[in-house]
Amino acid sequence: MAEDVAGAVKGPSVGGQVATALVLGAVLAGGFWFMAKSDMDGAAAREPAVCTASTGSLPSQYVSGTELCRALNRPDLPALLGTPEEKARNAWGSDGWLTVGSAKLPSPEGNVGLPTYSVKLSASYDGLPVARMGPLLGRTAEPTRVLGRTAVLYSDRTIALKIPLVGGSKAETGTGGIARHLLVAKDAKDGGGAYELVVWRQDEAVPDDTALLRVAERVLPTIPGWAAR
C-alpha cells in the first residue's frame, strides 16, 4: 500500500528557485511526508483540516506561513476550486529563508490539500518587480492583471512522490502533472516582491485557470497588509 502525492516544483521567486534547486528535493520530501500523515489523520477525523502552525519563525514585519495558510484555508475554498463537495485534508504553514548570493530572504508559505486539488500560497521578498519576471518564466508566461495589480500566469511540472505506508520499500520520485502559477505584485506600483498562488491536481490533469483566478480574487485581499500596499 502506498500514498501518491504531488508537489509544485516552483518556489516563491525565480531567484529563490535557482538558489534552492539543490535542496528542494529534501524540502519536498519532508512536505510530502507531512501531507501523507495529515491525509490519514484528517480522514480519521472526517472534518476539514485546520492550519498547523508554521515551522520556524520570521520577524513581525513579514507575513508568516501560518497567516498565509489561514488566508488560503477558507471554508469556501473547495467551492472556489469547483469541487464544493470536498473538504481540506491537510493544511500547514512554513517560515523559511532563502539564501541568494549574500542575501538571506524570508520565504513563508501556506499549503492546503484537498482530494482533487492542492494549493500553495507564498510570499517573496526578493525586490523583483513582477513585470520583469515574465521573460524569466519561459514560454508559458502570460502577463495579466489581478485585483488591479501586475500579474503573470505560467506553468511548470510537479514532482510526483510515491510514499510506501507499509513495508520497507523506499520512496520513489518522478515527473508529475502540470502546476499553474499566478504571481501577483505585492503593491499597486509593482515596486518589488510578489505573492504566488499555485494549484495542481492529484490526478495530474491540467488545473482550471478560472478556478485559480477565483481563488486569487478571494484569498489575496485577506492577506495581512494587502490593503495598505
Image (cartoon, grey):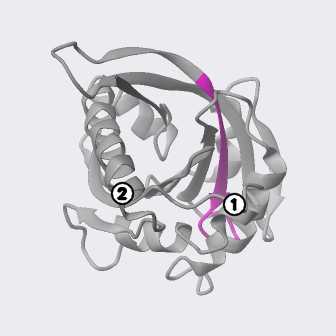
Q: At 49% from the left edge and 81% from the top edge, which residue is drawn?
A: 224
In front here: 82 or 58? 82
Q: Tell me the element at label 1.
A: loop
Q: At 64% from the left edge and 66% from the top edge, which residue is drawn?
A: 77
Q: Answer left or right for 164 relative to 189.
A: left
Residue 108 visible (yes or no) = no
| Magenta span includes 189 | yes
Residue labelled with disc 2: 44
**Span colored in magenta:** 177-190
| Magenta span includes 114 | no
Question: What percent of the width, then of the height, locates residue 227?
Answer: 63, 85
Q: Answer left or right for 174 relative to 36.
A: right
Give residue 174's quadrant in the image.
top left
Q: Answer left or right for 198 relative to 98.
A: right
Up-down: is 79 above or below 1? Answer: below
Comparing marks 2 and 1, which lies closer to the viewer?
Answer: 2
Q: Main secondary structure of the magenta part?
A: strand
Please state the total of marks drawn on the protein image: 2
In front here: 57 or 160? 160
Up-down: is 86 above or below 26? Answer: below
Question: What percent of the width, then of the height, locates residue 10?
Answer: 50, 35
Q: Residues within 10 Å of mark 2 (few under 14, many from 20)?
A: few
Up-down: is 96 above or below 72? Answer: above
Question: What percent of the width, then of the height, locates residue 169?
Answer: 21, 12
Q: At 62% from the left edge and 39% from the top edge, which residue is drawn?
A: 200
Question: Which tag, 2 or 1, sits closer to the chain's start?
Answer: 2
Q: Answer left or right for 57 relative to 192.
A: left
Report, in whole angstroms, how far the alpha carbon at label 2 lies from the one at label 1. 18 Å
Residue labelled with disc 1: 85
